[in-house]
Image: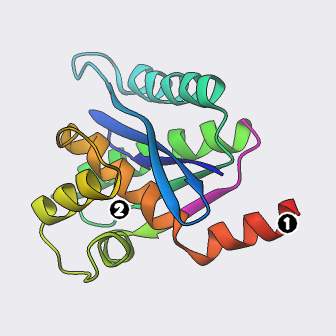
């Protein structure tokens, strides 16, 4: 089963792809889609959508997991972040993927074992769990953590049962 994890952002959207075989997790790829903040916002959303659509077309994941983000510095930031999440969600749905959402607390709990873990702890655990040679770029590492969370969740188990 292949999972695409997404850490949405209006400036940087991270993605991480893992395979789950039995109880083993395998790193496939990770990266980030960078948008140019000097461009109009609609063009930035289009870049996020198109970038994720390309990742989906290249790697053919079985599911997409997206981090639910609910903290922002101000209302304008929250709106932009929500719109970036929307572009990511639409990329998944338009590609026919089941889309799942997880809070930061759920991701940290799944990866580190407690929901109040520091970002550095999550990054170190992702590196260890996926046997990475180094810690991935911050947004990509967060996206890999979301994918790991889904791979070990009840949502993943539902997909596996329905595939049988």
Expressed as whole percent of the image width and height from the top left, the position of residue 143 reads: 37, 49
Q: Which residue is mark 2?
A: 69
Res. 83 in view: no
Location of residue 1 with respect to 133 vertically, above or below:
below
Mark 2 neighbour density, 10 Å: few (under 14) some (14–19) many (20 or more): some
Query: In the picture, which quadrant includes the C terminus?
Result: bottom right
Nearer the observer, 38 or 66: 66
User: From the viewer's perspective, is the residue at label 2 or at label 1 nearer?
Assistant: 1
Q: Is-magenta flag for residue 30? A: no
Residue 49 x %, y %:
53, 29
Q: Secondary structure at mark 1?
A: helix
Direction from residue 34 to residue 25 in the image, left or right: right
Q: Which residues are magenta?
A: 95-101
Q: Give percent across and percent down for residue 111.
A: 33, 69
Residue 66 numbered tag: none
Helix, strand or loop status at disc 2: loop
The front one of 79 and 134 is 134
**C-alpha distance separating marks 2 and 1:** 29 Å
Q: Which residue is mark 1?
A: 162
Residue found at x 50% / y 59%: 24
Q: Is residue 126 above or below residue 80?
A: below
Give the residue at x 41% y 39%: 15
Asked which colour scheme the image uses, the reply is: rainbow
Q: Is residue 100 magenta?
A: yes
């Amino acid at each position: 089963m292949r999972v695409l994890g997404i850490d949405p952002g209006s400036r940087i959207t991270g993605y991480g792809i893992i395979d789950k075989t039995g109880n083993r997790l395998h790193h496939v790829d990770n990266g980030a889609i960078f948008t140019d903040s000097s461009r109009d916002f609609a063009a930035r959303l289009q870049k996020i959508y198109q970038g994720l659509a390309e990742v989906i077309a290249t790697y053919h994941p079985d599911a997409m997991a997206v981090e639910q983000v609910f903290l922002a510095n101000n209302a304008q930031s929250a709106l932009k972040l929500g719109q970036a999440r929307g572009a990511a969600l639409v990329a998944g749905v338009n590609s026919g993927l089941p889309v799942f959402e997880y809070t930061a607390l759920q991701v940290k709990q799944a990866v580190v074992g407690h929901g109040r873990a520091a970002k550095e702890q999550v990054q170190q655990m992702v590196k260890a769990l996926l046997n990475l040679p180094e810690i991935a770029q911050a947004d990509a590492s967060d996206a890999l953590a979301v994918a790991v969370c889904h791979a070990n969740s009840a949502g993943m188990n539902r997909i596996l049962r329905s595939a049988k």
